[in-house]
Image: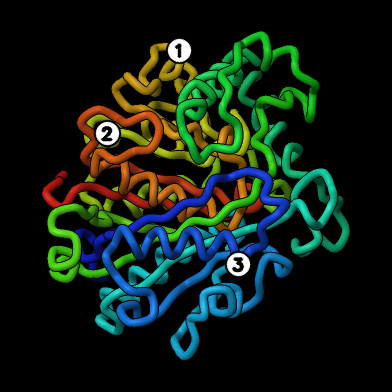
Amino acid sequence: MPESIRDKVAIIGTGVTKFGEHWEEDVGDMLIEAVHDACKEANVDLMKDTDAAWVSTLYDFSGMSGWAMVEPLGFYGKPVTRVENQCASGMDAVRNAAYALIANKYDIVIACGVEKVFDQGGRGLSQDILYWHPSLAWQAAPAYFAPCAIRAFKEWGWGRKDLARVAVKNHQNGAKHPKAHFRREITMETVLNAPMISYPLTLFDCCALSEGAAAIVLTRPDIAKRLVGDKYATIKALSLTVETQWPFFRPGWTGLSFPATVKAAEDAYEEAGITEPLKELDFGVVHDCFTITELMTYQDMKLCKTGEATELIKAGVTAIDGELPINPDGGLKCFGHPVGATGVRMIAELSKQVLGRAEGCQVKDAKVGFAHNLGGPQAIASVAIVGTPDWKP
């Protein structure tokens, strides 16, 4: 059997810039802030103490190869790897760093991510990096997910109000987070009356473009105790699943589930020893690139039965004071989605929550939580489970 990562990797430092429009800062400025904040919290010196780094960027204009981190931070002469795996890039950078640690190759490592997109112009994420189908047309991101909502409306009787509840919940949480891009609560009417982007998704059903950087410092628990005492979290599971980049062209595609998420969740639960996620997990941070995505994720991650995701949110189960708060930070709806940084930021949020140091809404008595990234057109999923060292399933 493969060796489990559970409780073998500690998160001892986190750093996250404010997400938003950074017109007067470049990629290096943001990475410097995030990495140095993470090192300060971890009580480590970047050059003297850390052995290697993984940096996540999606676009070449945000950084190429290890230079993306090495040049601004002067991190010369050490192994640095650039990670790109669509929207799951950040979490995959953490996964690579964590597994290098348990291989005993390094003692202290950095995982970081960054994206800067506004300088490039355009009104949405560039699709130029995708490999196009030789004969069938491609579309922008909202059109990847809008058909899923239409199908859910037909199959399960969901409606636009069900989507709007997700946006309202997440903006209520994100309004309290100092690092979020959008910090204003919204109403159901605001969502429902907003301009239509791709039916049935309105402007407030979609996450926005954003820029930012995030970093975490990882080590093994024995070293963590020496550096930060008991102020560290441990990784319980890290999984990644890659499906076809053309799911819509598969004859069996339904739009009612994302197979990559299903498999990644199964792998993570098995590694962490979780059998009843709704009861055993305390909170979650999910990839709400669109409101329909959050609802689908409830089901794909077995938080409820198929077709019942809307009942969770109606009953307040996923509210900040509910049984299983989802996106207590406001999610992508409030932070936006600087692709390379998002997954790293999510894991930083898990660590802060379980240590009782959340910068926005703090989940009460949080001991363990999960983060979920969904990359590309529903095609790449990563799930991380992080908790206190003493948490056991």
Relative depth, front residue between 129 and 264: 129
Neighbour tally class for label 1: few under 14, some 14-19, many 20 plus, Cα within 10 Å: few
Q: Identify the residue shown where x is 72% and y is 51%.
A: 23
Residue 140 lies, in percent from the top left, at 79, 44
Instruction: Point out the tag, 3 or 1, that comes first from the N-terminus.
Output: 3
Q: Which residue is mark 3?
A: 28
Which mark identifies residue 105? none
Spatial CA span between label 2 and label 3: 35 Å
Residue 371 at x, y = what percent?
41, 45
User: In the rendering, at what x and y percent does residue 152 appear?
Assistant: 61, 24
* Callout in the foreground (2, 3): 3
Disc 1 is placed on an element classified as: helix
Q: Amino acid at mark 3?
A: Gly
Question: Does 62 sit above or below residue 127?
Answer: below
**Quarter of the image where the C terminus is located:** top left
Residue underneath mark 1: 314
Amino acid tagged 2: Asp
Residue that label 2 marks: 282
